[in-house]
Image: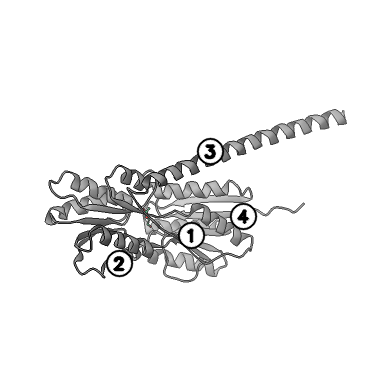
C-alpha cells in the first residue's frame, strides 16, 4: 500500500463579503472534499491590499506547500507572489492579475471578452446610437481595466455610441450608489449603464428607480443565482455577463501541481450573455446542479456511516476471535 503524502494549501482571498467570493470558497470546498490528504488554510483581507500582503507572508512563513491568491490589486501583491514562486513554492493566481510572469498558474474568466461581449450587447440593444455611463471596479485590479478595454473596443466601431461618464465603484454597491447619485441628474438622456459587476448594476437600478423619466438599460457582470440571475429575472437589470468563479478548477489545478502532473499555466474561462431570453434556463440549470450536489453529499454521508458500521463489526469480530 502506497503511503499518502499530506500537503497544506494556503489561500489568500482579497475580500469575502460578497456572494461571488463566497461561492468561490464553496466550490473550492466541494472539490477539497475529495482530497483527504489536503490541509487547507484560508485568510481573507477585507479588500485591503496591505493586509493581504501580511496575510500571504504569514501563510508562506507557516510552511505551506502551495499558495492560492486572489490579489486585491495587482501591484502591491506582485512581490509576494514573485518571492514565493522563486523560492520554489507553487503559486496559483486567481481572478485578478499580478505584474509578474513568475507564478505557476493563472485561473480566471476572460475579462477582456466579458467587456467586449457587454459592448457588443450594448451596441445591439441601442442600435448603435446612445449615451453610456460606465461604473468600474477598483481601477488597479486587472478585471476593471480589461472589462473596460473590451467594452471600449466593442463600441468604438459605433461613432454615435459614447461613454459620457466613467465612475469608480470599487466593485462595491455602496460606493457605486454614492458616486452615481452625485452625477446621475446631469445625464437625463443616458441610455445605458455598464456596471462591471452585478452588485454595482443593481445599485445603478436603485439610483435611477425613483428618477422620473430616466430609465437606462443596465448591464452587469457575474451571473450568480443570488444576484445577477435574480436581478435579470426580476428585470431590475437588463443583462449580465457570466463570470464563473472557477473554484473547483482552482483546487484541481493545485492537486495536479502538488502531484507533479501536467497542467496549463494560463486558464481562461469562457463567458456568455444572460438576459430575459435565457435567464430561466440558466436558473433551472443552477437548481439542477445544486440538487445533484445535495445527492452527492447525502451519498458521502451514507458511505461514511457504512464504513463506521463495517469498522465496528470488524473490531467486534476481532474481540471474539482473540478471546
Ligand atoms: C467580487 C468581485 C466580482 C467581480 C470580481 C472582479 O469580489 O467584485 O463581482 O467580478 O470581484 O475581480
* Residue under pointer 3: 294
Distance Cα–Cα, label 2 vs label 4:
45 Å
Q: Nearer the viewer, mark 1 or mark 3?
A: 3
* Residue under pointer 4: 7
Distance Cα–Cα, label 2 vs label 3:
41 Å
Q: Circle 1 sits in a helix, a strand or a loop, which is it?
A: helix
Residue 25: horizontal and vertical position, in percent?
Answer: 47, 48
**Horizontal placement of 322 versus 111: left or right?**
right
Label 2 or label 3, whichever comes before in sequence order: 2
Residue 244: horizontal and vertical position, in percent?
Answer: 43, 54
Q: Circle 3 sits in a helix, a strand or a loop, which is it?
A: helix
Q: Which mark is residue 57?
A: 1
* Residue under pointer 2: 154
Q: Nearer the viewer, residue 257 or 234?
A: 234
Q: Which mark is residue 231?
A: none
Seen at 73% across and 53% down, the residue is: 3
Label 1 or label 3, whichever comes before in sequence order: 1
Q: Relative to residue 57, is residue 234 depicted above or below? A: above
Amino acid at each position: 500500500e502506497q503511503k499518502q503524502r499530506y500537503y497544506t494549501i494556503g489561500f489568500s482571498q482579497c475580500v469575502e463579503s460578497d456572494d461571488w467570493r463566497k461561492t468561490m470558497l464553496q466550490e473550492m470546498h466541494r472539490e477539497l472534499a475529495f482530497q483527504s490528504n489536503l490541509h487547507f488554510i484560508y485568510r481573507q483581507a477585507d479588500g485591503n491590499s496591505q493586509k493581504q500582503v501580511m496575510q500571504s507572508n504569514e501563510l508562506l512563513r507557516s510552511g505551506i506547500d502551495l499558495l492560492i491568491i486572489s490579489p486585491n490589486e495587482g501591484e502591491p501583491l506582485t512581490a509576494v507572489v514573485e518571492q514565493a514562486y522563486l523560492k520554489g513554492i507553487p503559486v496559483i493566481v486567481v481572478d485578478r492579475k499580478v505584474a509578474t510572469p513568475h507564478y505557476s498558474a493563472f485561473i480566471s474568466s476572460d475579462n477582456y471578452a466579458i467587456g467586449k461581449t457587454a459592448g457588443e450587447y450594448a451596441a445591439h440593444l441601442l442600435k448603435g446610437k446612445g449615451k453610456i455611463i460606465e461604473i468600474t471596479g477598483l481601477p488597479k485590479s486587472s478585471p476593471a481595466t480589461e472589462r473596460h478595454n473590451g467594452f471600449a473596443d466593442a463600441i468604438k466601431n459605433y461613432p454615435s455610441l459614447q461613454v459620457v461618464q466613467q465612475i469608480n465603484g470599487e466593485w462595491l454597491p455602496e460606493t457605486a450608489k454614492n458616486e452615481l447619485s452625485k452625477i446621475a441628474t446631469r445625464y437625463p438622456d443616458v441610455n445605458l449603464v455598464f456596471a462591471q459587476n452585478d452588485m454595482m448594476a443593481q445599485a445603478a437600478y436603485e439610483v435611477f428607480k425613483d428618477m422620473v423619466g430616466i430609465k437606462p438599460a443596465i448591464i452587469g457582470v457575474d451571473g450568480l443565482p443570488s444576484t445577477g440571475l435574480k436581478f435579470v429575472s426580476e428585470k431590475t437589470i437588463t443583462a449580465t455577463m457570466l463570470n464563473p468563479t472557477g473554484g473547483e478548477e482552482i483546487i484541481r489545478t493545485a492537486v495536479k501541481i502538488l502531484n507533479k502532473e501536467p497542467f496549463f499555466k494560463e486558464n481562461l474561462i469562457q463567458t456568455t450573455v444572460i438576459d430575459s431570453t435565457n435567464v430561466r434556463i440558466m436558473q433551472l440549470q443552477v437548481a439542477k446542479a445544486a440538487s445533484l450536489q445535495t445527492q452527492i453529499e447525502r451519498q458521502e454521508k451514507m458511505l461514511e456511516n457504512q464504513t463506521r458500521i463495517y469498522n465496528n463489526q470488524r473490531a467486534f469480530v476481532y474481540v471474539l476471535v482473540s478471546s
